[in-house]
Image (cartoon, grey):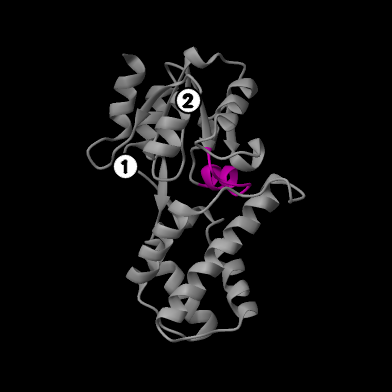
Amino acid sequence: MLILLDSSFTLIKPSQPVGLVYAQYLKASTELSVDPAKIQTAFQSSFARAPSPDYALGTSGHAAEVSWWRSLVLQIFLEILEEDSLSAPVPVLEACFDSLFEYYAQPASWTLYPETVFFLEAASEIGTLAVVSNFDDRLAPILNGLGIGSFFEEIITSADALARKPERKIFEFALRKLDSPAEAACFCGDSYEADHLGASSAGIRSFHLKRPADTLVDFLDFCRS
């Protein structure tokens, strides 16, 4: 059996709320104070409606992901500052983004869910494990730094596949990489659209992880069924 897993909000989560971190970095860069809750709301809204990166324009998948994140974060900052009748030079906001991007490259910026290690130890006894995530080249060092990278046969990101979930292309890329038919795989992720519907469209049996009602232990039972 091939057991495929999303990363963010499935195996790991930010160690601090995104809105709080963004507000702290924005204040450090511009001396402007913005409500963290407002940034959190803006981030979730902007992230949900943002189109996929344009992989055709970048020199690499990772470069396309970085460009995508830069545009998203700058848009959030500019919108929030305008709402509060504040302003900051774009180069300063770009430098703030660079610092944030580096911050989220550090394993300490992330934390494991309480059951993650137990799940990985148990799941590794019943199948081959791999990650399929809308992420970039920072992901493997993060998972390694958190002590779980060695559980995975492959850590596959949208930067590798040049496609983001829910596109079938990223799931098909993973199946080819791991030499597995879709019917021999199962997948778990927290997003209904990107993860559950995306994997299902590729013919992969999918489990929608609905925290806090579900945990990875429930997915373990799903894999065994």
- Above or below residue 109? Residue 222 is above
The residue segment tinted magenta is 133-145
- Above or below residue 82? Residue 4 is above
Q: Quadrant of residue 174?
A: top right
Whether residue 207 is visible, yes or no, is yes
The residue identified by callout 1 is 114
Instruction: Describe the element under mark 2 as helix, strand or loop.
Output: helix
Q: Which mark is residue 179?
A: none
Q: Is residue 116 highlighted in magenta?
A: no
In this figure, what is the number of numbered marks? 2
Question: Residue 119: percent from the left, percent from the top?
Answer: 36, 30
Q: Quadrant of the C terminus?
A: top left
For residue 77, side relative to residue 61 (left or right): left
Whether residue 102 is visible, yes or no, is no
The residue identified by callout 2 is 201
Question: Residue 37: percent from the left, percent from the top?
Answer: 33, 69
